[in-house]
Amino acid sequence: MQLVDECIINLKAGTGGNGIVSWRREPNVPMGGPYGGDGGDGGNIILIGNHNINTLFEWRSRKTVIAANGENGRTAKETGHNGKDIYMNLPLGTSVYDAQTNELIIDILETGQTHIICEGGRGGRGNASFKSSFNRAPTLHENGDIGEEKNIIFKLKYIADVGLVGLPNAGKSTLVGQISNAKPKTANYQFTTLTPVLGTVTKQQNKMVFADLPGLIEGASEGKGLGHEFLKHIERCSILIHLISLNPLDNIDVIKAYKTINNELKKYSKVISQKPIIYVANKIDVNDATRNLTKLKKGIKSKIYVISALHRIGIDELLDDIFQKFNKIQLENKKRLLGKITKTKIIELKQQKDYAKDLKIKQIDNNQWEVHSQFMQYWTHKIPLDTKDNILRYNQKMQSINVEETAKAQGAKPGDTLLIYGNEFVVDK
């Protein structure tokens, strides 16, 4: 399957349905009253983690994802149907960013994890919802709210407990295939592995996920070869296995092979270079492997595990030590979390929002003034000016942030026109 580990997409939740004005007209109900139903809510766009997916390929060709709008309200006080939610299945390890601010919104790390990324607009109320003891026959009704819209970047960083790094032909795919349930493609040429391959290794009641990451080359941290788009997948690993081939046909200079990978890890990320690294010399079964092993032991002061992934030589000892090291890291992480002091939550009184804060009025002609305000923009959409009750309500919204007074203070005269998002109002005396 083709690897797609980053894409940008436009998401738009559904707009809520409109409430309607309707009246109950039946011979046996002489004072039927308001009967208009509310609009349905717009559909949400929901992200969901799915362990059966390993790329973002499904969303690469989708430039836009749009959820359904809610239905308009109906007579007999019936609410319109809600718009259908859209579920976007994402591979585990997907980081979701706001394309405009580049801020991280959420990491999708668990199967079944859900997050509403764009919320559908609420349905508008019909006139039946406005009935009260003060107004028994309201003609008030609302349009539905507009659904959220966002430009989103998906970045996939594969989740694994242990990441295998090394030059091409180090034998990473063979090792993962021997110790796990993964069946990676193997062959004796560079970049056989074009996508990270995940394999689960179980030992007694413990379980770890190993990632066979594509072979790195010198200059990978600058983008050469397959490298730097795959280096990011190492970031979530707890342990790294640096696999080095002892086969002279793969590495004439094993010390150079060792240094190449170490240097690329350091150049790419200080965090990655400081992760626990286990050095493993592979292909001990080939001719002249012992000569390269001797050179490697002189160049690396750390412990070197010697294996043949193909013939399963030395693998049991390697796995025992990896599980032991991983369990120790997990225990340390738990202690660190438990050691954090829980701060007392301070409850603050919610301050009333100043809706007039962003009100701006500018003169665009001798007798015309243009009003800019998020508050009025919202209510201009929300309140259709097709009934006397709605016009009165809209005027109340204008008065609540002193639109007319602010215009007069800036020089507007009685009879001048206020332009408010497509609506026109005349300044009173």
Image: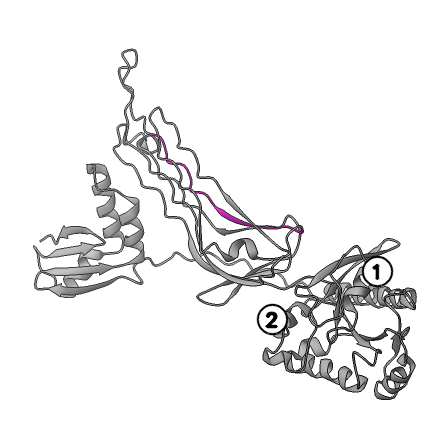
Q: Does 428 appear above or below 258?
A: above
Q: Which residue is mark 2?
A: 229
Q: CA distance from mark 1 to mark 2?
A: 26 Å
Residue 136 is covered by the magenta coloring: no
Residue 327 position by quadrant? bottom right
Residue at image x 91%, y 64%?
316
Residue at image x 17%, y 55%?
419
* Circle on res. 296: none
Task: Kindly check if marks 1 and 2 are in contact, taking CB atoms under 8 A apart as contact.
Answer: no
Q: Does 57 appear above or below 322?
A: above
Q: Is residue 277 shown to the viewer in this render? A: no
Q: Which residues are magenta?
A: 37-51
Colour style of the rendered protein structure: one colour
Helix, strand or loop under label 1: helix
Quadrant location, the N terminus: bottom right
Name which residue type carries label 2: Glu
Q: Nearer the viewer, residue 36 or 87?
A: 87
Q: Which residue is mark 1?
A: 179
Residue 37 position by quadrant? top left
Q: Is residue 182 left or right of residue 9?
A: right
Helix, strand or loop under label 2: helix
Residue 40 is covered by the magenta coloring: yes
Number of numbered callouts drawn: 2
- Circle 1 Cα neighbour tier, 10 Å, few/some/many (<14 / 14–19 / ≥20): some
**Label whose residue precedes the other's in the sequence (1 or 2):** 1
Q: Is residue 336 left or right of residue 96?
A: right
Name which residue type carries label 1: Ile
